[in-house]
Amino acid sequence: MRKTFIFILTTFLVTTVCAQKAPKWLEKVRKAIITIETVTKDGISKSGNGFFIHENGEAVSSYDLFGNVEKAVVTTADGEKFQVTQILGADDLYGVIRFKVSVKKKAPFLTVAAADPVLNAIVFIPPSKEEKALSQTAISEITKVKNTYNYYKMEKPLPKSQESFPLLNENGEVFALTQADAAGKGKTYGISVEYIKSLNVASMDMLKHTYSEIGIRKAWVPSVDEAQISLLLYASQQDAPTYLETLNDFVSTFPNTTEGYVSRASHYAYHRKELSAAENEQLQMLDLAWEDLDKAEKLTKNKAEANYDRAKLIFGVVTDDSTLHYKNWNIETASNYLEKAIAAEDHPAYRHLEGDIAFYNRDYEKAYTSYSIINQSSSASASSWYLAAKSKEQIPGSNLMEIITMLDSAFVKSPESEAAAYLLESVDLKMQVGLYEQAVKDYDTYYRLTRGYVNDGFYYYREQAKFRTNDFEGALKDIDMAIAGNPGNAVYHAEKASVFLRLKDAGKAQASAEKAIELQPDFAPAYRLLGICLIRQEKKAEACPHLEKAKELGDPVVDKLIKENCN
């Protein structure tokens, strides 16, 4: 009872407007409070409060003020305006955000209290433009945020003008950010500033709704390796001009990291047309890319890798734009830098690029040799085996079985998400050399890998493989599936006629051939098949006009049938 009386009395005393002289620290507090104006992606303006907690321009406020925002400007107590440049950390559940402001000099900031206030402690809320007096109240309840930080409750209504204001101890040190009573019961809440300070952007956070909703650039994580992950993720989320700003910020933050310069060089070169519509400025982008590559080379001890990076970028840009003719941006220069890289270190990645350049130059022997060097090492990959096979395929007189073996190796090396594509390359050649049973197995594997998401063409090609293994029942099922997927394809109906002929069902074969002709009246093979169906039914007189029609339409193999059955 006594405790309750003391608390009520304390609350009455501290919420009464005091006639005392304002504390000395109040002016410092006033200067640290800022007004924040934000503009959403839809052009809607919002405004609210916040305050600096560090002289470098670090500040805190309400997350709601930044939701869906493209830009934010703060106005200090002295009327100066500064841009919000970075989001340092945020929590949309607790409604708080920490950000960086581009101040020209040291920002007036509040010292964060070293010790947390206790229950019933007297605390202060500085005056706003609307609330002229320094507000005093007592802490009535303390709960926990994330089991570590404090969340405070006070038995006092919070005016709108004092939301996101600092909660201060008797020394003018801030310990919490004020928050309104969402239930509308006339309370004031405060969330620990130490908790807001603990919020940081992690490398994968830009994928989370909390951060992806905010269009302002996020701070980099201290680790260069983790920051590079963020940089990579930003590339798929931002347009070319915005991503250039991100790259510039990365280079500024990590000036001694070669990857930033190499990434920016690549962006300048590949996206020059998106960065500028003027052709002369696009060429200047290539010069900027070259300068960045020079900077990266100076920073690294691995000159082989620097030469490789330059060769790779030149080759990629030149092959991407065959109309480009500018300074050293050509295949010959790429080859020269790559030769330097290989001379210094015979790395598999360098050999792969060597193969790519040779393949582009149609020097398939050299390309095959380069890819083969990789395949003889532990760095052999699906790509190196596949490209070796494609190079070998272009060399006259190559053994198809050797090419099939390479393609099978590509399939074995590939991740499951890519395996199906390599398998189809191999199965085509197996059909050419008569490995029909293996082709059927490969088609079955392809079906499994794609989880049955195949089109009518798949069933048609697997039907042909089954047909050649004399699995005519299996072939019939597949051609029916092909027709179900594309009933208007005359070739499928003609193929079904062929299957029925092998099953010695000339009547059904005839119906399929007639359907093919109905769908495509100028389809010569369908007339030949119809003629054969009628011959099998001892109807040569009826067959011959169809055979003659096939000849008239240019069928290359019908002459023998006409000679044997129509003369």
Image: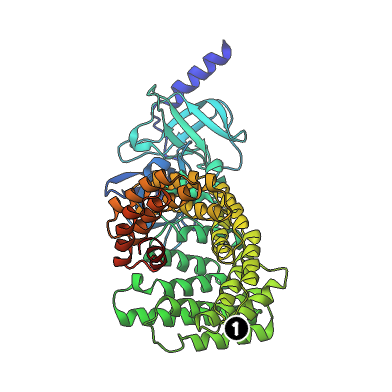
Does 399 sit left or right of 451 as displayed? Answer: right
Quarter assignment of residue 397: bottom right
Looking at the rendering, in which quadrant would you find the C terminus?
Answer: bottom left
Q: Position of 432 compared to 133: left or right?
A: right
Q: In this view of the protein, which residue sits in the foreground, 133 or 236?
A: 236
Q: Which of 440 and 526 is in front in this view?
A: 526
In the picture of the structure, the residue carrying the numbered disc 1 is 365
Residue 288 lies, with reference to residue 454, above or below; the image says below
Q: Compared with residue 202, is residue 127 higher up or lower down, i.e. above or below?
A: above
Q: Residue placed at 57% from the left, 73% from the top?
A: 258
Q: Residue furthest front?
A: 567
Q: Where is residue 261 in the image (x, y as percent from the top left)?
A: 52, 73
Residue 416 versus residue 267 in the image, above or below: above
Number of numbered discs visible in the structure rendering: 1
Q: Where is residue 337 in the image (x, y as percent from the top left)?
A: 57, 86
**Which residue is drawn at the image coordinates 57% and 49% (left, top)?**
471
In the image, 310 versus 67, the foreground residue is 310
Q: Is residue 256 visible?
A: no
| Badge 1 element | helix
Image x and y of residue 318, in percent: 44, 80
Residues 276 and 380: in front is: 380
Colouring scheme, one of rainbow, by chain, secondary structure, one colour:
rainbow
Report crowding for label 1: few under 14, some 14 to 19, many 20 or more residues within 10 A (C-alpha).
Answer: some
- Residue 389 visible in image: yes
* Residue furthest top as drawn: 1
Residue 200 in the image, given as x and y percentages of width and height: 54, 49
Residue at horizontal 46 percent and vertical 30 percent from the top: 189
Q: In which quarter of the image is residue 101?
A: bottom left
Disc 1 marks a residue whose amino acid type is Glu
For the N terminus, the image quarter is: top right
Residue placed at 57% from the left, 26% from the top?
119
